Image: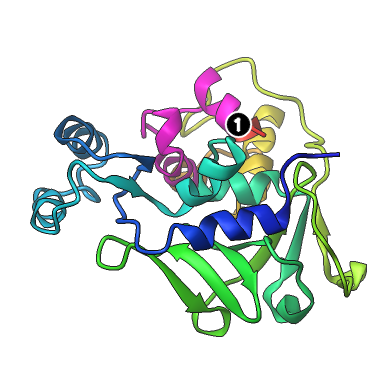
Amino acid sequence: MSNLTGQGLANYAESKKGTPYFYGSKMKVLTEDFMKSMHAAYPTVVTVAYMALARTKKQVGKINVDCSGLISAYTLKTLGSAQLYSQAYARLPISTWKQWAVGVVVWRSGHVGVYLGNGKVAEAKGINYGVVITDIEKGKWSYGLTFSWIDYTITTPVDSSVITYKIANPYTEPTRTLKKGCTGQDVKWLQYELVEAGYKLTIDGDFGKNTDKALRNFQQSCKSAKLDVDGKCGPATRKALKAS
C-alpha cells in the first residue's frame, strides 16, 4: 500500500496557503541565481519585469513554489503539469467533480491544483497570488487526475464509462533524434505521447508544425528536467515523456 494518500496531498497543499509563487520553483528558497537561470531558459515567461516584481514582493530568500511544485513537494515525483496529465492512471471529467475523492489533482492545460473537498481547490495560482484556496467551479478546470501511486478514499465512484484510463503506447519508441520534417512510426510514438500529455494532435507519423509546437510546449513545461526548448526529441525529452 502506498505511503502517499489523497488526504495527505490535500492536507499538504492546503497547509502551504500563502506561499509565494515563482515560475519553476519547487518549494525551494528563491535566489537571484535561480531567477537568472530561469530567465535564461524561459525569457518570455521569466522576464526582467517578472523578476523585478518578485524582488518588490520580497520573495527572494523565501520558499517559493509553482503549480506542479505544490504537488511534487509532497509526492517527491517531479512532474510538470503536462507530465502529470500524461502519467495519470485515470482522467475524470470536470463534470464529475462532486464525486471526486479528496486529493485528486485538478488539471487544465498548463496548470494544476489539488482538490480539497467541498468544492475547494488549493493552487499555486501565479506570482500575483501565490498559493490560494479557490472554488473549483470558477477555475475553468478540464479534468481530475488520479495516480496509481496515491491511495484515495472513495465514497462515490465515478462512472467508469466516462473515465479515460492510461494505456501503453502502441508505437515503437524512437532510437533517432526526431525533429520537424521527420516521418515514420517513431514519429507516431512521439505524437501519441504528446496527445497523452494533453496536446491536440493527429497521430499521422508526420512531424509538422503542430507536432513541433506541441513538443516545444511540452519541453517548456518540464522545467525541472531542464530540457532545451528546441523542438527536437532526443533521449532527454523521451525520458521526460515517459517519466512516472
Provide the residue designation for mark 1.
183
Q: Is residue 42 left or right of residue 174?
A: left
Q: Is residue 154 left or right of residue 28?
A: right
Find out whether residue 218 is within the magenta segment: yes
Front-most of residues 90 and 175: 90
The residue range painted magenta reads 214-240
Residue 203 position in % (x across, y down): 68, 47
Q: Secondary structure at mark 1?
A: loop
Q: For residue 161, what is the image quadrant?
A: bottom right
- Amino acid residing under circle 1: Thr
**Magenta stretch prevailing secondary structure:** helix
Q: Is residue 172 left or right of residue 14?
A: right
Which quadrant does the N terminus fall into? top right
Q: Residues within 10 Å of mark 1 (few under 14, many from 20)?
A: some
Q: Residue visible at 86% across and 72% down?
A: 158
Residue 230 against residue 126 in the figure, above or below: above
Q: From this viewpoint, is residue 113 visible? A: yes
Q: From this viewpoint, is residue 112 visible? A: no
* Colour convention: rainbow
Front-most of residues 182 and 101: 101
Which quadrant does the C terminus fall into? top right
